Image: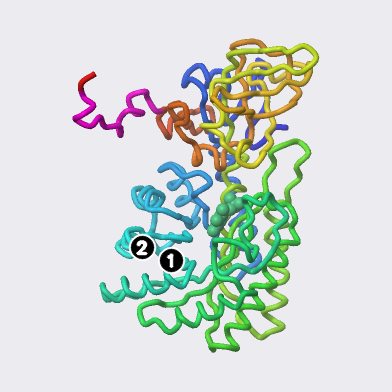
Amino acid sequence: MLLGTQRINYRGHLEVGGCDTAELAQRFGTPLYVMDEQCLRAMCRAYRAAFDKRFRESLVILAAKAFITLAMCRIADQEGLGLDLSSAGELHTGLHTGFPPERIFLHGNNKSAAELEMALDAGVGRIVVDSEAEIELLQRMAAARGATADVLVRVTPGIDAHTHTYIQAGQIDSKFGLGIGTHQALPAVEHVLARPNLRLRGLHCHIGSQVFAIESFDLAARMMVDFVREVREATGYVVEELNLGGGLGVRYREADHPPSVDDYAETISRPLHEQCERHGLPEPKVMVEPGRSIVGEAGLTLYTVGVVKDIPGVRTYVAVDGGMSDNPRPALYQAQYQVVVANKAAWPLDGKVTIAGKHCETDTLISDIEVPELAVGDIIAVQTTGAYNYSMASNYNRLPRPAVVLVCDGQADVIVERETLDDLLRQDRLPQRLESR
Ligand SMILES: Cc1ncc(COP(=O)(O)O)c(C=O)c1O
């Protein structure tokens, strides 16, 4: 499986963005996150084209939680996307690049007053309110500064998105949003409409992540338009903006066949056009918030093999120099990945191994995967690590977080420096009473 600009070059090495990945490993060290700029931009453009052609007005918003760095925010800006940010840290990063605040959407099920303050100071485009408590808090804060905040109300449509339970978000039993089926969404809309310092601009929902069952998006769109109608009937308010969240799945393994961006846009557009027409509703501005499907396939992680341990009749473990600190997804939700051996990309497969990380846990990155014959020093490229890897990385076992390199047309630029051992000590403090040994 080769993704984005990946190809096998004349040396039989894996190449991405015109760069030999074995050389990248040598030049920048491992573990190393590599992001394929052309692939990132192609996904941004595919989304914009698919939505531009189907809707009177639309906006594609990058869910930055999947992968956020200054460079990524700049690329999203250049490609005309919005930014979905969900913490002060993400907001700080977006604003630091000069990202237009009017295209920023602030999310979160428990935004702090400080985060709301920051958003109001920056004049972000929309604050997506998630609870009654937040509606009250935001009203008080906006009133105190004599401002009006533009908000969307996040609702839970009550849909099982057929994905891993840890990344489902649209079902009734969710910490996010206000349930339509539990009769909490409509009162929340009424409360926003009644607050003088909040201006309701529309509705938001997000049903989950890594969704392959395209009918879930169809259902979400139908339920949301039904709710738009309910809101109009109950309040007279006509929803201007409908944000349907993210969730489209990506290809982690050869056998994965996620719907295309075009199929996804079509699946949303059909019920939206039909339902709006049937109910005599003006078509709202349609927004989507893809994260994984924009950045996922653009990323790969390079590791160096340190140990090959064969347990006769049981299995062969191949230990690499990273693991759950740079990619917690296998441990979190049994995520599965595909690999290419970067320096042996053209070699025949030789048998199954289990790729293990170096952490003091089971820390299995990939079980029972076919690889060529492996030796210490080989470079393993784990594919589709662009989403929820760097952004979820930790310093478990005090491993410095890897560098991130952006590759394009044969050029490789560090967009996040590798952490140093001293970086790991930077926030540590020794209280005076512990200073003497
Ligand atoms: C509100 C919201 N929007 C968008 C996304 C992006 O989802 P995905 O990365 O699956 O596209 C998420 C992810 O959890 C989310 O919580």
Q: Is residue 98 above or below residue 38?
A: below
Quarter of the picture holding the N terminus: top right
Residues shaded magenta: 419-435
Q: Position of residue 257 (x, y in %)?
A: 76, 45
Between 50 and 66, which is closer to the camera in this rendering? 66
Residue drawn at 56 percent across, 64 percent down: 287
The residue mark sitting in front, 2 or 1, is 2
Mark 2 near mark 1, Cβ–Cβ under 8 Å? yes
- Numbered tag placed on residue 127 in the rendering: 1
Residue 147's quadrant in the figure? Answer: bottom left
Residue 429 magenta: yes
Q: Position of residue 410 (x, y in %)?
A: 53, 27
* Amino acid on which disc 2 is placed: Leu
Residue 227's quadrant in the figure? Answer: bottom right
* Amino acid on which disc 1 is placed: Ile
- Numbered tag placed on residue 116 in the rendering: 2
Kindly state the secondary structure of the residue where label 2 is placed. helix
Q: Which mark is first along the chain, 1 or 2?
A: 2
